[in-house]
Structure formats: structure tokens, C-alpha cells
């Protein structure tokens, strides 16, 4: 791993952010590991509850994967192709252990891929059994404008650009904060040859 995590560099809306928590070597290693995940469990565009494809393409690794269609949002034990989700790469788990501790391991790592025009609306991560466990997120590739609000919908929000290697944790009071991504600064990073942004979010589902 590129860095030993100490105190966060930024706290915004209760979210803790470690700027460049992963150095270039660690980012490159992680992208290589994620290419294997995507080869086994290809990215797909989930449908929203209203039947519209999401602009973000997704897959998962770990025991559970995130899935959504007209029946709603939920965790599934298999990729839509029927295969098990691949295991969470060690280098990704290392980041969880460094900032969330190793008393409990995440059983889902959602892999989001944002192309040039992808965005993610404000939402809460609230389909997990125990909110005392944080959500740990890693950003790779192009910068994304992350917005965070409160636990209640419709309150004030704040924004921060998440850049390649940044690590963010939603824990404590911020665990159920509304959050989303307004836009990508396409081409701002050279990490991914074709551009775009990868965001990983690790969660403890059950
Ligand atoms: C998410 O909430 O699933 C993704 C957040 C991000 O892309 O930074
Ligand atoms: Mn989320």
C-alpha cells in the first residue's frame, strides 16, 4: 500500500478523506487487480426502479454484489451471468484494514465505472444490516465531484473533488449521509488509458 493511514486530510459533511491515500504504484496495482475482477464479472448497467439504465456501469466482488432492476435495489449472491462474484483483491482489503480495522471484513466491494457523462444521484447506502460498520471508498482515474448532504433528504450539501488515489470513509454520524457524484472531469488523470473514473465501495452487508 502506498501510505500508512493516519488522521484524515479533509473532513467534509462528516466524511473523512485521505487525499492521495494510495500512491501511483498502489493505484496501478489496484487497477490490474480490478481488470481481473471485470474479466470474471463484467461491468453491466443496472436499471433503476423506473426501468432506466443507470449511467454508471457496475460490477462487484466479495460474497455479495449490488444489483438493481425494476424490482428494486438489493444485494445478490451472483453476477447477472450466474457466476459467483470474484473475491475482493487483497490490495483493496488492505485499505479497509488500514482505516476501518480488521475486526470485521467487508463482504461486498462495489465497483463503479464512470464514463464521460456518468453521474450518480444523491442516495444513502442503507441496505446493509449494521450501520456501525463504515463504508470505505477508493477513487481511481479521473476526478469526480462528490456531493454530501445530511441523513435527511433535502438539506444543505457540500462538494469535494475526489481524485485518483483518494480514500473516503462514511462512518459514525456520516454513515447514512446522502451522497452522490455530480460529474467527472473526463481526461484529468492518466491512470486509465481510455479515461473514466473507477470508484470502489466496501461494505459489510450482513
Ligand atoms: C457510491 O455511492 O456508490 C459511489 C460514490 C462515488 O462514486 O464516489
Ligand atoms: Mn453510495
Image: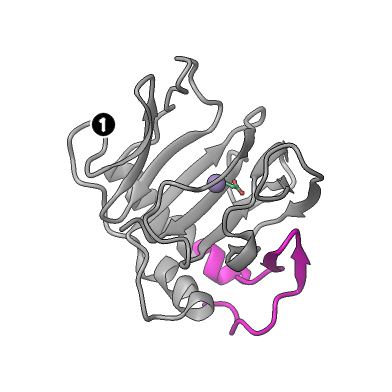
Q: Is residue 116 magenta?
A: no
Task: Name the residue at 38% across, 61% down.
Answer: 204
The answer to whether residue 162 is left or right of residue 127 is right
Check the image and name the residue furthest to the top.
51
What residue is shown with label 1?
Answer: 80
Relative image position of residue 200 (x, y in whole percent) = 50, 53
Task: Name the residue at 30% across, 58% down.
Answer: 206
Mark 1 nearby-residue class (10 Å; few <14, some 14–19, many ≥20): some
Q: Is residue 21 magenta?
A: yes
Which portion, as a residue range, is magenta?
A: 1-28
Query: Which image quadrant is residue 119 in?
Result: top right
Query: Quick check: can you spot residue 165?
Result: no
Query: Which image quadrant is residue 99 in?
Result: bottom right
Decide which of 84, 128 is in the foreground and name it.
Answer: 128
Decide which of 103, 173 is in the foreground and name it.
Answer: 173
Decide which of 48, 142 is in the foreground and name it.
Answer: 48
Check the image and name the residue furthest to the front.
152
The answer to whether residue 62 is left or right of residue 102 is left
Relative image position of residue 4 (x, y in whole percent) = 59, 85
Relative image position of residue 178 (x, y in whole percent) = 64, 46
Query: Which image quadrant is residue 103 in?
Result: bottom left
Local secondary structure at mark 1 = loop
Task: Name the residue at 47% across, 67% down.
Answer: 132
Query: Quick check: can you spot residue 12?
Result: yes
Task: Name the residue at 47% across, 65% down.
Answer: 29
Amino acid at each position: 500500500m502506498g501510505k500508512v493511514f493516519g488522521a484524515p486530510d479533509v473532513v467534509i459533511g462528516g466524511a473523512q478523506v485521505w487525499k492521495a491515500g494510495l500512491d501511483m504504484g498502489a493505484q496501478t496495482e489496484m487497477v490490474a487487480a480490478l481488470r481481473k475482477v471485470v474479466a470474471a464479472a463484467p461491468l453491466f448497467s443496472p436499471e433503476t426502479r423506473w426501468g432506466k439504465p443507470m449511467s454508471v456501469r457496475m460490477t462487484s466482488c466479495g460474497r455479495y454484489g449490488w444489483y438493481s432492476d425494476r424490482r428494486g435495489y438489493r444485494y445478490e449472491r451472483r453476477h447477472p451471468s450466474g457466476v459467483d462474484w470474484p473475491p475482493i483483491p487483497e490490495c483493496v482489503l488492505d485499505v479497509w484494514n488500514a482505516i476501518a480495522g480488521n475486526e470485521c471484513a467487508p463482504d461486498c466491494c462495489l465497483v463503479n465505472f464512470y464514463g464521460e457523462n456518468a453521474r450518480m444521484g444523491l442516495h444513502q447506502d442503507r441496505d446493509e444490516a449494521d450501520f456501525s460498520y463504515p463504508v470505505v471508498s477508493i477513487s481511481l482515474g479521473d476526478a469526480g465531484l462528490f456531493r454530501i448532504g445530511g441523513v435527511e433528504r433535502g438539506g444543505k450539501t457540500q462538494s469535494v473533488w475526489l481524485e485518483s488515489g483518494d480514500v473516503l470513509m462514511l462512518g459514525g454520524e456520516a454513515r447514512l449521509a446522502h451522497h452522490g457524484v455530480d460529474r467527472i472531469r473526463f481526461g484529468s488523470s492518466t491512470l486509465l488509458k481510455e479515461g473514466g473514473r473507477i470508484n470502489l465501495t466496501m461494505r459489510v452487508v450482513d
